[in-house]
């Protein structure tokens, strides 16, 4: 990847851990992680945000897995950005494939959530990616383009500076199957070209586009060595401190000249 972009590595814990496991995972990450120029965030389940946030120090920031796009009010079961910020959250996932395809979130809802996150001053990690049938029928780039355009509709170039795009091919999530470095690079380069056409060349050069889908210590370095792969969004492997820290180290190693 380019020296201009600081790699971004996120640990999406999904609906895993309990309070004690989350605390011990953070302790182990703190004791294993080597300092370096990588932006690292963890995304624990809602009930543990405050507790995990209080344990985080220095380079790791706190993220949430979802938000609701209105301010506080009659939205039973939902969580607003002001609540998230109150817990110390600085980043939030939007459009994760499990929310799109299991919960049924539309492009419009993903867009509303992304805009709300950005208006609130949070970093939005906008997740996109094609399903297996879409890949097999040659629609990967069309799906990515639709999800990027819809997800960023109404987002200004200034706000885009707080967007990270996570390309997560759905067929690679939790399956042990990973996109080849060349396939990931191809998708990322097209997403970056799309950002250039929607915003500007400099916005495209600055935005981090990270890969997610069965990233692990054994494949992280080759994926992140690709010029347009700026880090990773990690599910399963983020629940093991040793694996997560090895991926962070691979991201550090991906910086040109390091
Ligand atoms: P896995 O790393 O478990 O495949 O999950 C990827 C993911 O969905 C991260 O958001």
Image: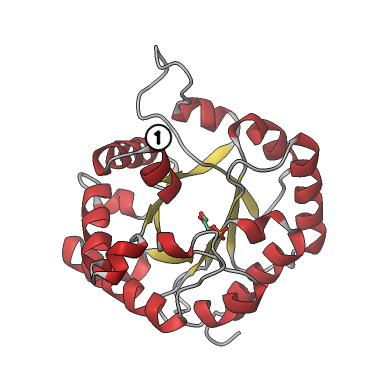
Considering every residue shown, the one lying at the far left of the view is: 197
Q: Where residue 93 sits in the image (x, y, percent)?
A: 46, 46
Q: Where residue 258 sits in the image (x, y, percent)?
A: 61, 84
The image quarter containing residue 157 is: bottom left
The image quarter containing residue 127 is: bottom left
Residue name at image x 32 percent, y 48 percent: 159
Residue name at image x 21 percent, y 54 percent: 149
Task: Judge from the rendering whether residue 34 lies leftward or rightward of residue 165; answer left or right.
Answer: right
The residue closer to the viewer here, 53 or 76, is 76
The image quarter containing residue 102 is: top left
Considering every residue shown, the one lying at the far top of the view is: 74
Q: Is residue 57 above or below residue 247?
A: above
Considering every residue shown, the one lying at the far bottom of the view is: 257
Q: Where residue 1 sits in the image (x, y, percent)?
A: 46, 79
Q: Is residue 168 visible?
A: no
Q: Is residue 242 above or below residue 43?
A: below
Label 1 neighbourhood size at 10 Å, few (<14), some (14-19), many (20+)? some
Q: Is residue 177 visible?
A: yes
The residue closer to the viewer here, 247 or 99, is 99
Residue name at image x 23 percent, y 72 percent: 138
Q: Secondary structure at mark 1?
A: loop
The residue closer to the viewer here, 232 or 253, is 232
Residue name at image x 75 percent, y 49 percent: 26
Q: Which residue is mark 1?
A: 120
């Amino acid at each position: 990847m380019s020296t201009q972009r600081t790699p971004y590595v996120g640990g999406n814990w999904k609906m895993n851990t309990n309070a004690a496991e989350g605390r011990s995972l953070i302790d182990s990450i703190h004791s294993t992680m080597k300092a370096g120029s990588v932006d690292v965030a963890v995304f624990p389940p809602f009930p543990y945000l405050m507790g995990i946030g209080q344990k985080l120090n220095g380079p790791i920031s706190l993220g949430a897995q979802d938000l609701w796009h209105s301010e506080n009010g009659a939205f039973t079961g939902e969580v607003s950005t002001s609540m998230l910020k109150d817990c110390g959250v600085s980043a939030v996932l939007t459009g994760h494939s499990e929310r799109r395809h299991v919960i049924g979130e539309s492009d419009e809802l993903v867009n509303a959530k992304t805009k709300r996150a950005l208006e609130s001053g949070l970093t939005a990690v906008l997740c996109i990616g094609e399903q297996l049938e879409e890949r097999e029928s040659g629609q990967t780039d069309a799906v990515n383009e639709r999800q990027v355009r819809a997800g960023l509709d109404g987002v200004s170039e200034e706000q885009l500076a707080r967007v990270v795009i996570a390309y997560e091919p759905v067929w690679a999530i939790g399956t042990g199957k990973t996109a080849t470095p060349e396939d990931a690079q191809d998708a990322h380069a097209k997403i970056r070209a799309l950002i250039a056409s929607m915003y500007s060349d400099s916005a495209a050069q600055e935005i981090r586009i990270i890969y997610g889908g069965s990233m692990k210590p054994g494949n992280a370095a080759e994926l992140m060595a690709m010029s347009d792969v700026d880090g990773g969004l990690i599910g399963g492997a983020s629940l093991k401190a040793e694996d997560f820290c090895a991926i962070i180290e691979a991201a550090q190693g991906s910086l040109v000249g390091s």
